[in-house]
Image (cartoon, rainbow, N blue to C red):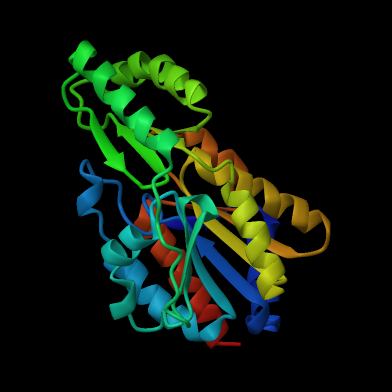
Amino acid sequence: MTTWHAKTPAAHDFLAAAAADPAGVLIALDFDGTLAPIVEDPETSAMQPEAAKALAELGPKVGHLAIITGRPVAKVRELGRLERRAGLGGVIVLGQYGAERWDARTGVETPPETPQSVAVATVQIRRALADLGLPGVHLEDKGRAVAVHVRRCPDPAAAYRTLKPIVTGIANANALVLEPGKHVLELRSSSMTKGDALRQLIAETGASVVAMCGDDLGDLPAFDLLRELRGAGLATCVVVSGSHELPALTDHADVVADGPAGVAAWLAAVSRHLGNR
């Protein structure tokens, strides 16, 4: 069964350019919802086995692999078991939308920190939740950010609508950036976007053939960047891990994948294409 399909000619152009210059390829991926299925408890998230296998095969064939995520770097390293994966000896992880970094080649990781504004906002959110009495709301401490998850609530959509103005007010009061997502509201201290992180990574690596795989609103700045760079002559490809929660996100796609399984299948297809060049 096909789990991904090309939506625009850019999908095929990317494969042709990648085969012509594998060393110039950068493939960047989100983690949750892209490499790992979305689960009720984010602490139990794990990389899709098929994705891990595809990355292991693809890693030695391309210039650069990166994970760009809202998660802290240390958490992605743990959940993805990155040090134990074959083929990922050169992967770069940009966490907190690029505010943190880990490079597998050097083993160097940016130390985490919790800004006072995030600590204060977390206390204020807990107080608001206590007053509201909403069951199932879960806070995730990300160091430089705090995420308010409503996926476990009896009515996640209603809980999201109730909490969004409250969390927005807390974010504004503490000069934090509010990042809405699928059943989550994240408050973060950095205004850096995944587009900023990807732009810096492209400049650092000199990549000229670039794909970004993502599934949520936080990935939109990176998708927008790839369209901009395509106009400047780079071969780029936007891969959307589709879901019923954000169906409109596929409007931005060159490749539409059926969730993390579809992303894994696309990665495997890229690997096979490069293997046959």
Residue 170: which quarter of the image? Answer: top left
Q: How many marks?
A: 0
Q: Is residue 42 left or right of residue 31?
A: left
Residue 80: which quarter of the image? Answer: bottom left
Name the spot of residue 150 as percent of width and height, x first.
27, 29
Residue 84: which quarter of the image? Answer: bottom left
Name the spot of residue 68 as percent of width and height, x first.
49, 58
Q: Is residue 9 above or below residue 16?
A: above
Q: Is residue 96 above or below residue 135?
A: below
Closest to the observer, 17 or 88: 88
Q: Is residue 142 left or right of residue 242?
A: left
Name the spot of residue 103 as percent of width and height, x first.
48, 74
Residue visible at 72% across and 71% down in the picture = 208
Q: Is residue 83 above or below residue 50?
A: below
Residue 183: tell me if it is visible: no
Quarter of the rendering occupied by the N terminus: bottom left
Residue visible at 47% across and 35% down in the picture = 247
- Residue farthest along the right direction in this orientation: 232
Q: Is residue 169 left or right of residue 274?
A: left
Name the spot of residue 82 as percent of width and height, x first.
34, 73
Closest to the observer, 230 or 136: 136
Q: Is residue 193 left or right of residue 202?
A: left
Residue visible at 46% across and 64% down in the picture = 110
- Residue farthest along the front direction in this orientation: 116
Residue 219: tell me if it is visible: yes
Residue visible at 66% across and 61% down in the picture = 200
Closest to the observer, 43 or 23: 43
